Image (spheres, helix red, strand yellow):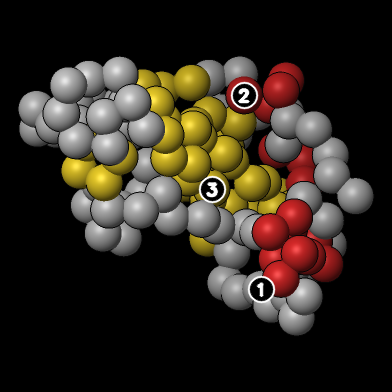
Amino acid sequence: MPSSWGVDVPKSLVIVRMTLEVSNGTSAVLPVEPMSREMDLLYGPNREEASPVTGYSYPDPAEGRRKGLSRDGGTRIPVDGRATFVESALVPAGSVSDLTVVVSLPSADGIRDPFTLTGVGVVVKTVK
């Protein structure tokens, strides 16, 4: 994302916005823990944890929907329902090609092992 979408983001860092859509194909409501993080962004060969974006403000609601750097999917996902989660983090500009995302999906059966997606840098697209 453009650095201008965040507050005080230095030019040496870029904002990476991750979007996760979860569909509930089970026969039970999927609980989502309040303030949970469904995605963690790591960068570089040592998989360092990316820093959170500290703030943003969009005076126009349409601009907020388009540029939104985070979105909470709610506290539950109904049967046959969907939820979209959006999280953003800051990474050094030179590390965008070497990203890993760890995805923790909600579950009605307790904690699941997370999915680790490597090589994510190849699917990153620049938004202007």
Comparing marks 3 and 2, which lies closer to the viewer? 3
Query: Residue 115 lies in what quarter of the image?
Result: top left
Q: Earlier in the sequence, mark 3 or mark 1?
A: 1
Q: Amino acid at mark 2?
A: Val
Task: Answer above or below: position of 76 versus 5.
Answer: above
Return the x and y of residue 113 as percentages of the image width and height: 22, 24
Label 2 near label 3: C-beta < 8 Å?
A: no
Locate residue 5 relative to residue 45 in the image: left or right: right
Return the x and y of residue 3 as percentages of the image width and height: 80, 61
Q: Residue at x 62, y 24 (%)?
A: 120
In the picture of the structure, the residue carrying the numbered disc 2 is 120
Q: Amino acid at mark 1?
A: Tyr
Return the x and y of residue 127 as percentages of the image width and height: 84, 44
* Distance (Cα) linking label 3 and label 1: 14 Å
* Distance (Cα) linking label 1 and label 2: 25 Å
Q: Earlier in the sequence, mark 1 or mark 2?
A: 1
Q: Residue at x 53, y 19 (%)?
A: 118
Query: Residue 28 lies in what quarter of the image?
Result: top left
From the viewer's side, name the closer residue of 15 and 92. 15
Q: Is residue 85 visible?
A: yes
Q: Amino acid at mark 3?
A: Val
Locate residue 39 relative to residue 15 in the image: left or right: left
In the picture of the structure, the residue carrying the numbered disc 1 is 56
From the viewer's side, name the closer residue of 10 and 53. 53
Label 3: how many Cα within 10 Å (few below 14, some 14–19, many 20+): some
* Distance (Cα) linking label 3 and label 2: 16 Å
Q: Residue at x 19, y 35 (%)?
A: 29
In the picture of the structure, the residue carrying the numbered disc 3 is 86
From the viewer's side, name the closer residue of 123 and 8. 123
